[in-house]
């Protein structure tokens, strides 16, 4: 049985201000992330993502870090983490992250004009995080080679729908009547 699919079907659902949210090791670190699940996901990312001539993997803190670290180790592509803390380093670019349940400012360093990047994230839901990241990367002149999210939560407005970015996903789900429903077990792309 596909570990990612089963782990999503088993995921508990919570509600935050009318937003139905699944609690999952990839997106929340709860319950604990089993190595077998992480390994399965990383292999699927490497097979699905366009990695040729990628200079850097770019991921948001915090839940993209474990995925991107594992992909970086397997591909020897350096990793840049977009952080929630400002350091004021030269070239630092800020972005405004707006998701279905939060809003915050984030900061990116070490991405420059002409860099070819893979953007990697845990969940695509409203598209708020990835829209902010792609906008900031465009601002510095980076070329976004590919964008991958492990899980896509369908059913709502997505801020990337009207952009040039087609996010590849490994699995697409919805939350219906308090349970995760697999909409496409192969995801997008």
Image: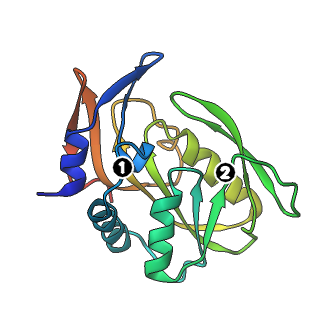
> Which residue is at 79% across, 54% downward?
93
Which residue is label 2 attached to?
135
Which residue is most to the left?
1
Tell me which label, 2 or 1, sits earlier in the chain: 1
Residue 22 falls left or right of residue 113: left
Which residue is label 1 attached to?
32
Q: CA distance from mark 2 to mark 1?
A: 32 Å
**Of residues 165 and 118, which is closer to you in this image?**
118
Picture quadrant of residue 110: bottom right
> Badge 1, how many Cα within 10 Å: few under 14, some, many 20+?
few
Picture quadrant of residue 33: bottom left
Which element is circle 1 on? Answer: loop
Determine whether label 2 and label 1 are within 8 Å by CB: no
The answer to whether 150 is drawn above or below residue 15 in the figure is below
Which element is circle 2 on? Answer: helix
> Which residue is at 88% across, 55% downward?
88
């Amino acid at each position: 049985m596909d570990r990612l699919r089963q782990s999503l079907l088993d995921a508990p659902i919570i509600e935050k201000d009318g937003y139905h949210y699944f609690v999952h090791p990839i997106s929340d670190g709860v319950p604990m992330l089993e190595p077998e699940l992480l390994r399965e996901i990383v292999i699927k990312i490497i097979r699905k993502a366009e990695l040729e001539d990628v200079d850097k993997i770019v991921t948001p803190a915090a839940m993209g870090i474990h995925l991107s670290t594992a992909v970086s180790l397997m591909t020897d592509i350096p990793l840049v983490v977009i952080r929630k803390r400002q350091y004021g380093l030269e070239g630092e670019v800020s972005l405004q992250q707006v998701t279905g349940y939060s809003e915050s400012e984030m900061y990116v360093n070490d991405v420059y004009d002409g860099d070819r990047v893979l953007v990697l994230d845990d969940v695509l839901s409203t598209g708020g995080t990835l829209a902010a990241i792609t906008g900031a990367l465009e601002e510095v002149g980076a070329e976004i080679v590919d964008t991958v999210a492990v899980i896509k939560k369908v059913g709502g407005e997505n801020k990337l729908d009207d952009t040039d970015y087609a996010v590849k996903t490994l699995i697409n789900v919805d939350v219906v009547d308090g349970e995760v429903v697999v909409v496409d077990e192969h995801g997008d792309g």
